[in-house]
Amino acid sequence: MAGDYIPGPDGDFHIWQNNFVTYVSTHLADLGLVAGDIAPLTAAQATWTTAYPAHTSAQTAAQAARVAKDDARGGLVGVIRPLVRRLQASPQVDDTERAGMGITVADREGSPLGGAPTSRPVVNVDTSQRLQHTLHFADEASPTSKAKPAGVMGAEVWVKVAAVGQPPPADPAELTFLALDTRTPYLASFAGADAGKTAHYMLRWVSTTGEKGPWSETASATIGA
């Protein structure tokens, strides 16, 4: 509560209670107390001084385990993505096998109108989860709809991860291919070492016949730690 003499944070309380119990214990007569008056106090302090270090140790271990888990996931994803790109480009892999692996299966039912897409994706990056970005994309001609333009198979997603202070990419050649995503949203995951850096994304539509449209505007977002 406001104005309470007992500190709220556990660390501050731990220091305060130790001073309080020590002072009372060494000034019993001056305070008009006897040993029996503070027996409940010292018993309660003994319980606290066991529970508090156990709690802080468990908290530290949980934080370390979370970092290890996130780093392990980032490492696994970093190995999976290049292999999936290789499989997606392989003529030996068909859509049945893609579905069996749980990777993107291109929507081949759209009518191939011929010609490259003329519009661009617009991108919104959700940064609410640490070490993850969720990319919501739509067509600039219908930004409130999830529908792709007619004759479009999906959006190519490209990224450049840059240190703080570095400028966004001036040329798409600076970016790295992430995926051809047939449906919004796209989830980008990062390793712990990328925390605090900036991810710069550019997307472009790809037609059902494989032709590429113009690049989107660069969408930039910080990778949360």
Image: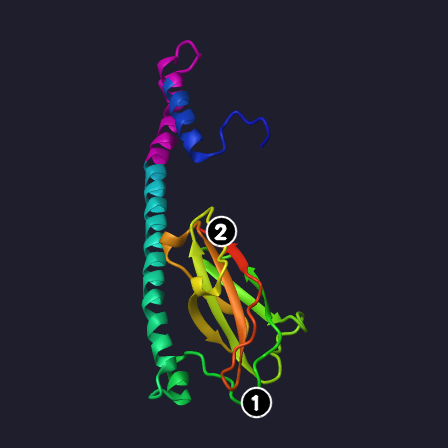
The one nearer the camera, 193 or 58, is: 193
Membership of 43 in magenta stretch:
yes
Whole-number angstrom distance, CA of label 2 to CA of label 1: 38 Å
> Vertically, is 194 above or below 11?
below
Tell me the amino acid under the disc marked 2: Pro
> Vertically, is 100 above or below 6?
below
- Pinpoint residue 61: horizontal percent, then vertical percent: 32, 48
* Mark 1 secondary-structure assignment: loop
* Mark 2 secondary-structure assignment: loop
Residue visible at 40% across and 17% down in the picture: 24
Colour mapping used in the image: rainbow
Membership of 145 in magenta stretch:
no
- Pinpoint residue 156: horizontal percent, then vertical percent: 49, 73
Residue visible at 55% across and 61% down in the picture: 218
Tell me the amino acid under the disc marked 1: Pro
- Pinpoint residue 180: horizontal percent, then vertical percent: 47, 75
Quadrant in the picture for residue 151 = bottom right
The one nearer the camera, 42 or 179, is: 179
Quadrant in the picture for residue 131 = bottom left
Instruction: Give, as a single range, the part of the protein colored magenta.
Output: 23-49
The one nearer the camera, 27 or 52, is: 52
In the rendered structure, find residue 167 and report the number of the disc placed on it.
2
- Residue that badge 1 annotates: 112
- Pinpoint residue 5: horizontal percent, then vertical percent: 52, 25
Residue visible at 44% across and 72% down in the picture: 179
**Left or right: 218 with respect to 164?**
right
In the rendered structure, find residue 7 and report the number of the disc placed on it.
none
**Left or right: 70 with respect to 186?**
left
**Left or right: 9 with respect to 86?**
right
Magenta segment, prevailing SS (helix, strand or loop): helix
10 Å crowding of disc 1: few (<14), some (14-19), many (20+): some
